[in-house]
Image (cartoon, grey):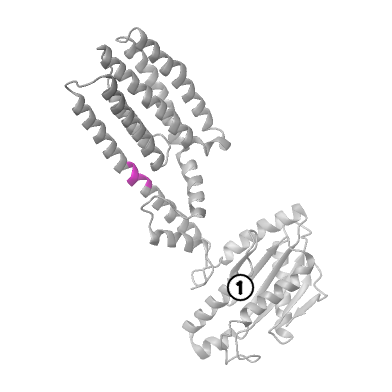
Amino acid sequence: MPEFDSDLQKYDRQLAKGFKSLTFSAELESEFRSYFQTRNVVKQRGAIIVGILLLLLLIPLDMSHLQGEILDFYLIARAWITIPILVVALIFTFREGFRRYFSVFSFFIITFIGITTNIQVVYGLQAGVYAPYEGAMLLIMVAFFLGGMYFRQSLTCIVIIALSYLILSEIYVGPYPTKLHQYFFIFATCLIGGVSAYTLEYQVRTSFLQRGALKALAKTDPLTGLYNRGALNQKLTHLVEYAFREKKPITLMLVDVDFFKNFNDLYGHIKGDQCLIRVASALARNCQRPLDFVGRYGGEEFLLMWFDAAPNEARSFAEKTKRSVDQLNFPHDASEISNIVTLSGGMVTGIPARPDQAEAIVHQADQSLYRAKDSGRNRIIIQDLGDENNIAHIVK
């Protein structure tokens, strides 16, 4: 297999490795968090709206049996703090720049609601006023499933809420008949919610990796792991448009394995596939910058592109690319020019004159490739973009 890391490989490798700790590699974790935020935004809005409506319905019910200081505390915590904060959170979900912080915001608001709920319940128990502890259980489920948080965040939130209830009730209330039952049901809610929430995030992460692998597969050549022709054409079109708009140079090269049909006839197709895999790996090492790319254009033909490189770098790119394949020392006794696998190539470099010039650039590189073949193979012919009559350099 190639030594480089393709998009498909990074998803497949993470699936094979597993993620029981609900953590990916740094690159994939960043990608997953963006996916998670986008996927959850509708659910988050719905949860906030439902939360506001339930609080508005609950306030008159609670006010009917609360009085004195506990009522004042309740109104401040619920009506004047919690509901306005939830409205702000709802606004956050419509601002793309704030979405990445929503899980942190959710952590603090649910923790706040949980602790104030516990204070209200304990205050009521101490004063002999009924205050349902089931509110803490409801918040536990909200934090695990509707809060828009990752499992670790929701688990930390729940531990804080549950412990605050236990500590407050032990310090300020003392023993009462149903205390152990309350503790049991709160613990059971945490356990069931936690296991379910862990399983849910694990499934979401699995779905993310499978989805990524399928998308990568659609643009990946199955033999070499490089971009396939469709993906190459798409990337090339976008980058040529960008290069034209920004007046940036591009360098594009088409290369072909010399006498590859002879290689297959002598060694067989399995050995031929191994040869292409090794060549693909060597070529990929020459395109390492963010906007550079390489792909299998078809058969034994590959396309390489370097974006925004200095004009005098084209010859260096050609030399390094050819040398990287020569240094494989891959035997080719059926070649008419060498006893190892070699390349012929055509390269064009320059600033696109039109945004729709991608096809013309590939055509010029292809014509240079044929000139390299006709003039003896095992060489790369370099031309300036748009100047098909003159040869700028020949790399042998």
Percent of width and height locating residue 13: 43, 62
Residue at figure coordinates x 20%, y 25% from the top left: 179
Residue at figure coordinates x 52%, y 68% from the top left: 225
| Quarter that holds the C terminus | bottom right
Q: Does residue 11 appear to the left or right of 97 in the view shown? A: left
Tag 1's secondary structure? helix
Please give the residue where the numbered disc 1 appears in the rendered image.
283
Identity of the residue furthest to the top in this view: 68
The kind of residue on which mark 1 rests is Leu
Q: Which range is magenta?
A: 197-201
Q: Does residue 112 appear to the left or right of 342 in the view shown? A: left
* Residue 313, quarter of the rendered image: bottom right
Main SS of the magenta part reads: helix
Percent of width and height locating residue 175: 20, 22
Res. 97 in view: yes
Residue at figure coordinates x 25%, y 34% from the top left: 187
Q: Is residue 198 magenta?
A: yes
Which of the pair 339/273 is nearer the observer?
339
- Mark 1 surroundings: few (<14), some (14-19) or many (≥20) residues within 10 A: many
Percent of width and height locating residue 150: 42, 41
Percent of width and height locating residue 347: 72, 72
Q: Is residue 289 above or below residue 276?
A: above
Which of the pair 307/366 is nearer the observer?
307
* Residue 234, quarter of the rendered image: bottom right
Res. 217 in view: no
Residue at figure coordinates x 52%, y 64% from the top left: 6
Q: Is residue 381 above or below residue 107?
A: below
Identity of the residue furthest to the front in this view: 171
Q: Is residue 28 magenta?
A: no
